[in-house]
Amino acid sequence: MKKALLLPVIFILILLSLSGCLAPHSVTPEQKRSAIINMHDDTLSRLYLQRPTAREVIDKAAGYAVFSNVNALYLIVGGGGGSGVAVDRSSGHKTFMKMAQVDLGFGLGVQDIRVVFVFHSARAYMSFVNSGWEFSGQADAAAKGRDKGAAATGEISIDAEKTIYTMSEAGLMAKVNLAGTKYWKDDSLNY
């Protein structure tokens, strides 16, 4: 009986520990937007250093989105969340968004990840901003502190209309899983 209760209790503790990571810790909408834009700028700077060809890919795209995601996985269940911004390259319009993830698979750890979505068509960009659902399988291993450790930067072409870059910020994670991730507009931050 005790073992049957252990997994749900651990899952709840993981979600509670991540609840503070789901959004910037700022008070006002202006401060939250500023924190997300700073994360956006830092993430793109790091991406361009690690993958110089990414700058040209993003410059030619119809739009792109940058997200910060903290997730945790304990044995077979996990989850995470974060925030980010989608940018329409033709107008420069920014749409602030949230994200949440549910993981099912085998793994253990907590990880801070940055994800950059590149949309090669206006249709793909608008579909993401307006409906934003992604589903994926992942295999990952990382051990990284702020400035030390090892983690890979990945690039995935899902189809002709989308490319995704991922970078690990910090954490320790080993996993093989399926993840369902939902992205949606943050009504409290958009004008």
Image (tube, rainbow, N blue to C red):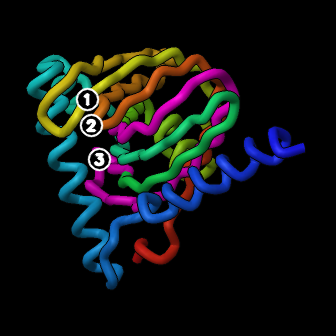
Can you give x and y, in whole percent of width and height, for residue 68 in the image?
Answer: 36, 47
Q: Amino acid at mark 1?
A: Lys
Q: Tell whether label 2 touches label 1 (CB within 8 Å).
A: yes
Q: Is residue 143 above or below residue 186?
A: above
Nearer the observer, disc 2 or disc 3?
2
Residue 144 circle label:
1
Q: Quadrant of residue 181?
A: top right
Element type at marker 3?
loop
Element type at marker 2?
strand
Can you give x and y, in whole percent of width and height, for residue 167 in the image?
Answer: 30, 29
Q: Looking at this view, name the residue that lies furthest to the front.
A: 2
Residue 90 circle label:
3
Name which of mark 2 and mark 3 comes first in the sequence.
3
Q: Is residue 101 in the magenta section?
A: yes
Front-most of 91 and 142?
Answer: 142
Q: Amino acid at mark 2?
A: Glu
Name which of mark 1 and mark 3 comes first in the sequence.
3
Query: Is residue 60 visible in the rendered structure shown here?
Result: yes
Residue 65 circle label:
none
40 relative to 68 in the view: left or right = left
Front-most of 99 and 95?
Answer: 99
Q: Amino acid at mark 3?
A: Ser
Cα distance in 3D space between marks 1 and 3: 36 Å
Q: Which residue is mark 2?
A: 169
Name which of mark 1 and mark 2 comes first in the sequence.
1
Residue extent of the magenta highlight: 86-114
